[in-house]
């Protein structure tokens, strides 16, 4: 029995993870669940899955759960509760599905405890890639990607040796504005940006997909996760979201991973690796005709891609600043305080203003995270 802690269980990834766990009661068990402030949904999950630990990182929200009387379940509160669960000896796998840089400390705690980490929080590697990979190596921890693109690369990279890889190619749906002109992008509304053509995701990552900042962050994540140079990472637009990414080898062979757009498949692969089992993920109907399209991305209309490659080359403090600036800028857009077309330029301005360090420690990265958010707040419309 693999005992799983699902950090961020009330979000879209967390809910999909619980579906995977529920479909495999003979081998997977949810022993810990966490949320920031979605107490109602977390308590519903606790009644269904009967975890040993329940964590609510927002202490104020935790008050609503104290009197519910969940038998056999210990309620823990505050951000430190996530780190405590991540270190718990009776947890085998920590699935980190907390959005943004808030998931960093619990991921580091799990790695220091030598756990397997199923990483659905790309910001962890964007902010602190070298530190994360160093800890995984030092403590013998496993870091397995849950992002569909990085899971696809992880699977395809097993078909050859590192020195045989020419490049990896991340696929991008192109979001809802793939065919919009620069003038049309100036008119984008929040409602339009939240309508993703193929994936059902939370608001922040859906906006990232619309700006293609999600692909910029995935470039940076792939750089650290797989030990690649920025020049070994490319992006191609694939509207159907069927080919989740692929690896091109030096002999010209291209190995891809295909599946319907359903996060349950990469989640199950990370939890069960190296085994494969039947599961609840959607499957192809090969009796129906289908077409797969690929096209190069437009770097002028979607400048986030160039920014991601620059940050992947720079390393150091650049990833932490870009990630924090983007989180703040997206929040500003969702609040009606920043135009859609100013999200990426705002991130670039903040990135260019910061004092770059090549080998920062965790404290410096967290300090810059706060600084970048403050800088974005100064740029927002009154």
Image (spheres, helix red, strand yellow):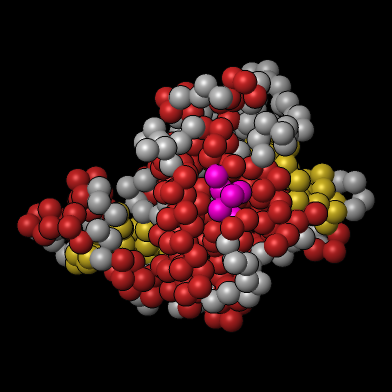
Residue at figure coordinates x 77%, y 33% from the top left: 296
Using residue 176 as the reference point, say whether residue 330 is left or right of it. left
Q: Looking at the picture, how far across and down is residue 381, in whole percent?
A: 42, 37
At which x and y percent is residue 183?
A: 62, 20
Near-viewer residue (97 or 126): 126
Quadrant location of the C terminus? top left
Q: Is residue 349 above or below residue 334?
A: below
Residue 118 seen: no
Q: Is residue 104 visible?
A: yes
**Residue farthest right in this picture:** 251
In this rendering, position of residue 34 left or right of residue 254: left
Q: Nearer the viewer, residue 322 or 82?
A: 322
Please state the extent of the stretch shown in magenta in the rendering.
346-351
Q: Which image quadrant is residue 126 in? A: bottom right
Q: Position of residue 22 (x, y in %)?
A: 36, 48
Quadrant of res 16: top left
- Residue 92 lies, with reference to residue 184, above or below; the image says below
């Amino acid at each position: 029995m693999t005992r799983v802690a699902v950090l961020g269980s009330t979000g879209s990834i967390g809910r999909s993870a619980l579906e995977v766990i529920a479909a495999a009661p003979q081998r997977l068990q949810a022993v810990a669940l966490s949320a920031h402030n979605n107490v109602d949904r977390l308590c519903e999950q606790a009644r269904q899955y009967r975890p040993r630990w329940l964590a609510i990182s927002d202490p104020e929200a935790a008050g609503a759960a104290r009197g519910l009387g969940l038998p056999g379940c210990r309620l823990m509160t505050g951000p430190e509760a996530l780190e405590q669960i991540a270190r718990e000896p009776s947890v085998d796998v920590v699935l980190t599905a907390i959005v943004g840089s808030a998931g960093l400390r619990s991921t580091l705690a799990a790695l220091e405890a030598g756990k397997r980490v199923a990483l659905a929080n790309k910001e962890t590697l964007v902010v602190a890639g070298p530190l994360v990979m160093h800890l995984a190596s030092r403590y013998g921890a496993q870091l397995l990607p849950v992002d569909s693109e990085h899971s696809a690369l992880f699977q395809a990279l097993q078909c050859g040796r590192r020195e045989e890889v020419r490049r990896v190619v991340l696929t991008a749906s192109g979001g809802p504005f793939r065919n919009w002109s620069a003038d049309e992008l100036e008119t984008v509304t929040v409602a339009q940006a939240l309508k993703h053509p193929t994936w059902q995701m939370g608001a922040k990552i859906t906006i990232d997909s619309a700006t293609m900042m999600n692909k910029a962050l995935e470039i940076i994540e792939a750089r650290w996760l797989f030990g690649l140079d920025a020049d070994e990472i490319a992006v191609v637009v694939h509207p159907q979201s069927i080919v989740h990414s692929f690896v091109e080898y030096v002999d010209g062979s291209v190995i891809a991973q295909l599946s319907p757009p359903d996060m349950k498949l990469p989640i199950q692969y990370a939890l069960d690796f190296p085994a494969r089992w039947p599961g609840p993920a959607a499957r192809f109907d090969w009796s129906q005709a289908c077409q797969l399209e690929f096209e190069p991305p437009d770097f002028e209309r979607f400048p986030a891609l160039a920014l991601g490659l620059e940050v992947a080359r720079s390393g150091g403090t650049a990833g932490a600043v870009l990630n924090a600036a983007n989180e703040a800028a997206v929040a500003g857009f969702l609040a009606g305080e920043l135009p859609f077309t100013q999200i990426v330029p705002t991130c670039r301005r903040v990135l260019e203003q910061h004092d770059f360090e090549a080998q920062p420690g965790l404290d410096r990265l967290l300090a810059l995270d706060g600084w970048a958010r403050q800088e974005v707040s100064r740029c927002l419309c009154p």
